[in-house]
Image (tube, rainbow, N blue to C red):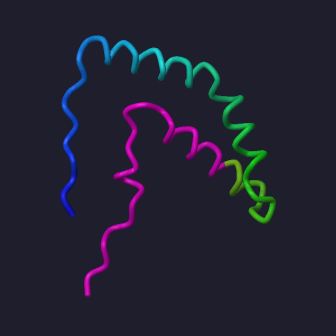
Amino acid sequence: MPTRSRPSPTAGERIDLDLAEAALVERYARLVRLTYLVLPTSLTRHRRVLTAHGIVQRALPGTGTRLLRPAPRRV
C-alpha cells in the first residue's frame, strides 16, 4: 500500500504546529481526565488510565501511529 509523503512544514506551519502542541501540553492533565471518563467502564482502572494517556499522547502533533500498528503477519 503506497504511503503519502508529507512535505516539510513551512515556517508559518511550524509556528502553528508549535502553538498547537503547546496548547495540548498545557492542558494535558485535563485531557487525560476527560478521556478517562469517556472510556468504557468495562476496562480496569489501570487500563483506562494507560489508554487515556496513550490517546492524548497520540493527539500531540508530530506523533504518528506508525509505531503502534502491529507488524503484518507472514503467511
Q: Is residue 47 left or right of residue 13?
A: right
Q: Is residue 52 left or right of residue 73?
A: right
Q: Residue at x 63, y 51 (%)?
A: 51
Residue 35 location in percent, x, y?
69, 43
Residue 63 location in percent, x, y?
40, 38
60 relative to 42, above or below:
above
Q: Residue at x 74, y 38 (%)?
A: 34
Q: Which residues are magenta?
A: 50-75
Q: Residue at x 20, y 27 (%)?
A: 8
Residue 3 location in percent, x, y?
21, 53
**Which quarter of the picture shows residue 30?**
top right
Residue 55 location in percent, x, y?
57, 45
Residue projecting furthest to the bottom: 75
Q: Is residue 31 left or right of residue 55?
A: right
30 relative to 39, above or below:
above
User: Quarter holding the C terminus?
Assistant: bottom left
User: Quarter holding the N terminus?
Assistant: bottom left
Q: Residue at x 32, y 68 (%)?
A: 71
* Residue 54 inside the magenta-drawn segment: yes
1 relative to 18, above or below:
below
* Residue 5 inside the magenta-drawn segment: no
Q: How many marks?
A: 0
